[in-house]
Structures are given as C-alpha cells and as structure tokens.
Amino acid sequence: MTEDAFDVIVVGSCMTDLVSQAPRLPKEGETIHGHNFFTGFGGKGANQCIQAARLGAKTAMVAKVGKDFFGDNYIQNFKDNGVHTDFVGQTTDAATGVASIIVNNAGENAIVIVAGTNMLLSRKELQEARPAISCAKVLVCQLEISPQTSLQALRMAQENKVKTIFNPAPAIPDLDPEFYRASDVFCCNESEAELMTGSSVNTVEEACRAGQELLRRGCGTVIITLGAQGCVVLDAQDSSCKHVPATAVTAVDTTGAGDSFIGALAFYMAHYPTMQLEEAARRAGQVAGVSVQAMGTQTSFPHKKDLAAELF
Ligand code: RIB
C-alpha cells in the first residue's frame, strides 16, 4: 500500500437531481401540483463517495460528466467535499446525467434517470485509474454506468486484492452472473433483491431466503437493506443470516438513504478492516438513519462531526 493509497474509490455515476416535492406520487397519465422544487448533487456512485468522504475516508471518484454547467458544478462539488477528481473526465459527446425525482409527504420517492455521460465511462478511463484502483482499500460500483465498465472495475480490484462492494442499482433481472463472483460484498435493497431472485422480499425471513439465493450465486457476503426494518447480513463462510435492526426515526426524505448506507459501509471496511461486517452494517444503518431526517440527497448526508463518537 503506497502513502497515497485511497481508502475508498468509487467507479460510478454523477447525476444532477431535479427534485419536486408533492403530497403524493402521480398516477400514470396524471398531472398533480407540487409545492417545492430544488436541484442537488446526486447519482448513486457520487452519493456513496461523498458519504464515505464526509466520514473521513480518503476518496477518489472515477466518473464522466459533461463539459457543461452541471458537469463543471459537479467537479466543484467533489472538490468541496475533499474527493480526488483526477479521474473525473469531461466530454462534449453527451450531457451530464440527470435524475427527475418526486418525493411525497411520506418521504418516499420515484426516480427517472437519464444517464448521459455516465454511459460513456469506459475501459480507457479505468486503465488510467488502474494504479490508484490497484492499491485502494475498498472499491465500490453500481449500475448507473455501463455494466461492462462496472464489472471490469470490480475484476481489476479483485485481481489486486482490493475489497469490492457491488450495489446492483438500479437492478436488472438478467444480471451477468460474473457480478456475483466479483463481489466481496453484494449490497442491495429489498426491491432489488426481489427483482434478482424472483421472490418477494417484505420480511426479514424473506430477505434471509433471498440472501441465501444470492450467496449461492457466488458472492462473498450479501447485505439486503430493508428500510425501517434494518438489514440482513449473510456470509458465505458460515451461511447464517443475521438481522441488524434499525433505530426508529421519522423520515422526511429517503432519497439516497441506500447510498448513505453503502458509502458508510465502505468507510468502515476501509478504516476498520477487522470489524465484523454485521457491526459495520449496524453503524452504516445509523448513518443512513440520520440521512433520511433531512430533505435532499447529499444535502442530508451527515459529516463525522454530526455523529455520535461511538460510531468511530
Ligand atoms: O439513490 C438515489 C440517487 O438515485 C439519486 O441521487 C439519483 O440521482 C439517482 O441516481
């Protein structure tokens, strides 16, 4: 490990979030009045990277944004959060990704992304980041960029004994089986687990069954997040299913809570490599629990100074 090694490298997406708050989510073909609109920094990859950075991880992002207003702003946002930006490229071949988000009064959301430049992140940029990837502590990937690029990044990390966290979001039913084998930690939410296993995931017991199925596909560890019910953690070594409950909070906006969880998990894995994954998941759940109590995505992600000392 060199002196300059990163704790956490994220190969993934950047989106500008266009958020409307409305009493409820509209039905198909329906127009409804909202009561507030704001823009913010989003994209699952960047969200996860920013959360890890805010907890104190030395982070780098591998991403592609547009040579446009949103892209310029995004790079500045990374710098403001202490994220290394040498591997964030800009191109005129597409526009920076955007996410149209509607948040209802219960804090639930519906999201449509137009990935734009995110889909242009390729093997070429990965090769440029290879020296940094190969000596990082943890690499994190999702599915808002080309799946091939995500898989190449996970493999590059594993070849160099870098721990991998894969978040298959947004989920696809026909995920390349290689993703399971390339994931030291395969972390998804209940709806993603449902889509990938074809079984319903509403209870802890159902999550455990889905987790066993995902383990059989070759991941080292599976975490399925269950919102207010916490998460389950399954390890290929002992194949037990551990339920990690969440602390009850009043949610005002759950957008990005899963990203806050994964960014925090990456931080704990990098900073406390001998910590049990169950304990890392418990602490990551506490961090994500803070994030749902404020509006917006990254705007709601806590910094180390905002959190209880026992989380560190
Ligand atoms: O997970 C939340 C994120 O999903 C939002 O920030 C939005 O950009 C979409 O990528």
Image: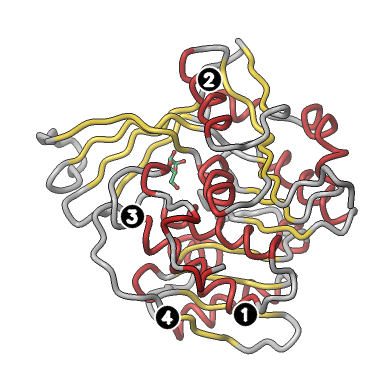
Q: Which residue is mark 2?
A: 71
Q: Which residue is mark 3?
A: 254
Which image quadrant for residue 246?
bottom left
- Nearer to us of marks 1 and 4 is 4
**Label 3 is placed on what type of residue?**
Thr
Which one is nearer the viewer's eye here, 220 or 296?
296
Residue 64 can be seen in this image: yes
Lower sequence index among marks 2 and 3 = 2
**Label 4 is placed on what type of residue?**
Pro
Q: Which residue is mark 1?
A: 234
Lower sequence index among marks 1 and 4 = 1
Answer left or right for 211 relative to 226: right
Query: Few, some or many C-alpha atoms within 10 Å of disc 2 (few <14, some 14-19, many ≥20)?
Result: many
Mark 3 → mark 1, Cα distance in angstroms: 24 Å
Mark 2 → mark 4, Cα distance in angstroms: 38 Å
Query: Few, some or many C-alpha atoms within 10 Å of disc 1 (few <14, some 14-19, many ≥20)?
Result: many
**Could you tell me which residue is drawn at 26 percent across and 41 percent down?**
102
Lower sequence index among marks 3 and 1 = 1
Mark 2 → mark 1, Cα distance in angstroms: 38 Å
Quick one: SS at disc 2? Answer: helix
Lower sequence index among marks 2 and 1 = 2
Mark 2 → mark 3, Cα distance in angstroms: 25 Å
Where's the C terminus, which quadrant? bottom right
Q: Which mark is residue 245?
A: 4
- Ligand 1 within 8 A of label 1's CB? no
Quick one: SS at disc 3? Answer: loop
Circles 2 and 4, Cβ within 8 Å, touching? The answer is no
